[in-house]
Image (cartoon, rainbow, N blue to C red):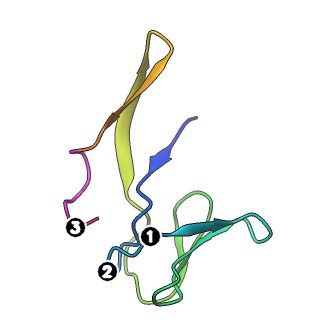
Amino acid sequence: ELVVFSRSCTDLGCPLDYEPGSGCFLCPCHGGIFAQDGRRLAGPAKSPMHRYAHRIRAEVLEIDVSSIPVAA
């Protein structure tokens, strides 16, 4: 299953970095940590990572950028 996450932390919108060694997404601003499936593991964020609505049509990935909150 393909999942398309927003790169923005659900706390204050800081850009998340993927850390291959831990297999987690890390927020450099406030120490938030998210699992590969988007679950919140630690830090001040209260919500999991936002997921974009998407589809594959004619072998092209189409992402609905309006499908997540603006602040995300």
Q: Quadrant of the N terminus?
A: top right
Q: Which residues are magenta?
A: 66-71
Q: Secondary structure at mark 1?
A: loop
Residue highlighted by disc 2:
12
Q: CA distance from mark 2 to mark 3?
A: 8 Å
Instruction: Give percent across and percent down for residue 19.
Output: 69, 68
Q: CA distance from mark 3 to mark 1?
A: 12 Å
Q: Which mark is residue 56?
A: none
Residue at point 51%, 79% (across, down): 27
Q: Quadrant of the C terminus?
A: bottom left
Query: Please, what is the dominant secondary structure of the magenta stretch?
Result: loop
Residue highlighted by disc 1:
15
Residue at point 51%, 43% (across, down): 3
Q: Earlier in the sequence, mark 3 or mark 1?
A: 1
Looking at numbered disc 3 in the image, what kind of residue is underneath it? Ala
Residue at point 37%, 33% (across, down): 54
Residue highlighted by disc 3:
71
